[in-house]
Amino acid sequence: MDSDEDMLDAHDMYSGEDDFYSDDYKDSDGDDDGEEPDYGFVEEDADDSAMIASHRSQKNFCVLREEDILRHQKDAIDRVSVVLSITEVEASILLRYFHWSVGKVHDEWFADEERVRNTVGILERPVVPPSDDSELTCGICFDLYPPEKIASVSCGHPFCTTCWTAYISTTINDGPGCLMLRCPDPSCLAAVGHDMVDKLVSEEDKKKYNRYFLRSYIEDNRKMKWCPAPGCEYAIDFVAGSGNYDVSCLCSFSFCWNCTEEAHRPVDCSTVSKWILKNSAESENMNWILANSKPCPRCKRPIEKNQGCMHMTCTPPCKYEFCWLCLGAWMDHGERTGGFYACNRYEVAKQEGQYDETERRREMAKNSLERYTHYYERWASNQTSRQKAMTDLQQLQTHNLEKLSDKQCTPESQLKFILEAWLQIIECRRVLKWTYAYGYYLPDHEHAKRQFFEYLQGEAESGLERLHQCVEKDLLQFLNADGPSKDFNDFRTKLAGLTSVTKNYFENLVKALENGLADVDSHAACSSKSTSSKSTGCSSKTRGKGKGSSRTGGS
């Protein structure tokens, strides 16, 4: 969109930072008309993502339901219709052409109304004047019809309703291009509005057209996107400029506004793209094959060794028998080559350097596979732990919170510290998961950065494990207790403290990674300056002593 008017006054935009670690958060102000905005951020039966979104204080976006989108569309159409003194059908055609930018419509219209009308297809005067004849000829089937069986748009070209219906229905079934439908006459650019659609096509086609029309409001707007989760019907209205692109939909899916992958702060979109591609690529399969198998010398199919004997037999129809070590024919082996469990020929050849390149490639593939496996296993494990934590949080809310309140004689409003702990765990598991993708692509030669990164990651992970264990296991004794426990207040203090400490650990980790571990470079620069200063000072002192000695010697 090209102006501030692009976004309707009715929008409840959030301009604050999308920061999970902010200390407090407040609900947004009401609409201009005094009504309370309702985009579904807080509901009695809200799902986990809604709670996470609220907890993270994400104020730089809002979630739009279908009724919100329809309302904003209607407001935009009404505004254009009133200001330009045109019909709602014409206003909707204009808005569609200018990507629902009210400001752009106004600017272009008042700059050159005639040019806009001709370009968009809203003709002020018909090309074909109205006829008083009792019968008119359809421009498609060329049959004669009474005037009531003929329809036309602003151009006046006459077509029978049967041909109109077939023309519009075919275009609707071809896809969203039906929203830019023009007169069937090849030389005419007059636009076909939704009034013709409502009048002529079937209910099924009307639903399709209205669906395309609804979706165009989001898909033509650069500040809005549909939630990419399968089956989700919500849209996200985003305010750029905060520097944080993670948003949470009400459908329990968090994603990055910039790349539409799942939320991955503090890792950048480029790293995430490379990591996802690597996880799905065949390269790791090839690395495994190189590291754990050898090709049959005859048919070249990869073979994995699953027993101790070096005597290998390829699968039918090849059935070639060969030695695993030297890949030579097995019939050439016997006692003189060391028997079944060793091959002196290979050892000799290896010493002569015949297999150095093959071994080097195999070792590189094995090391690469082991390194990737190390990071992938931890990435996947934290994802699994996060999903389990979300399930546990839902279980706590639906069953255990009320149970705990009854057993400990404590109001549910005073048990929010447990919900806060679970929300912290869910968010920290997400952050920790993506730090392993970050670590995988951290250059090996940057040893200082890697050490600093692994230190911060280790501290954060250690704090998270303590918090997770406390809320997962220590809570059980109070849930299973027969009555109130005197240790419950100590548990409250311990859990709140662990939540705060873990938050601080991850705050430091997030800031460091988002800054590209710049603290390491600045520390190295300071150390370099300090060393240089000391060296200069020592050199100066040495020269001073030299001059003193010279004077002493001269006296």
Image (cartoon, rainbow, N blue to C red):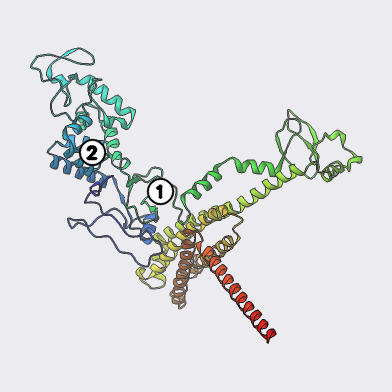
Which mark is on residue 233? none
Which residue lies at the image location 10% right of the left edge and 17% below the top edge? Answer: 131
Determine whether the residue tagged by mark 2 lies in a helix, strand or loop.
Answer: helix
Q: Position of residue 214 (x, y in %)?
A: 28, 39
Residue 407, above or below 192: below
Which mark is on residue 95? 2
Where's the C terminus, which quadrant?
Answer: bottom right
Residue 527, above or below 446: below
Which residue lies at the image location 19% right of the left edge and 16% below the top edge? Answer: 138
Report the front residue among 32 and 222: 222
Q: Which residue is mark 1?
A: 258
Which residue lies at the image location 25% right of the left edge and 51% below the top edge? Answer: 11
Report the front residue among 554 and 205: 554
Q: Position of residue 223 (x, y in %)?
A: 32, 47
Q: Position of residue 330 (x, y in %)?
A: 84, 35
The residue lying furthest to the right in this view is 336
Determine whether the residue tagged by mark 1 lies in a helix, strand or loop.
Answer: loop
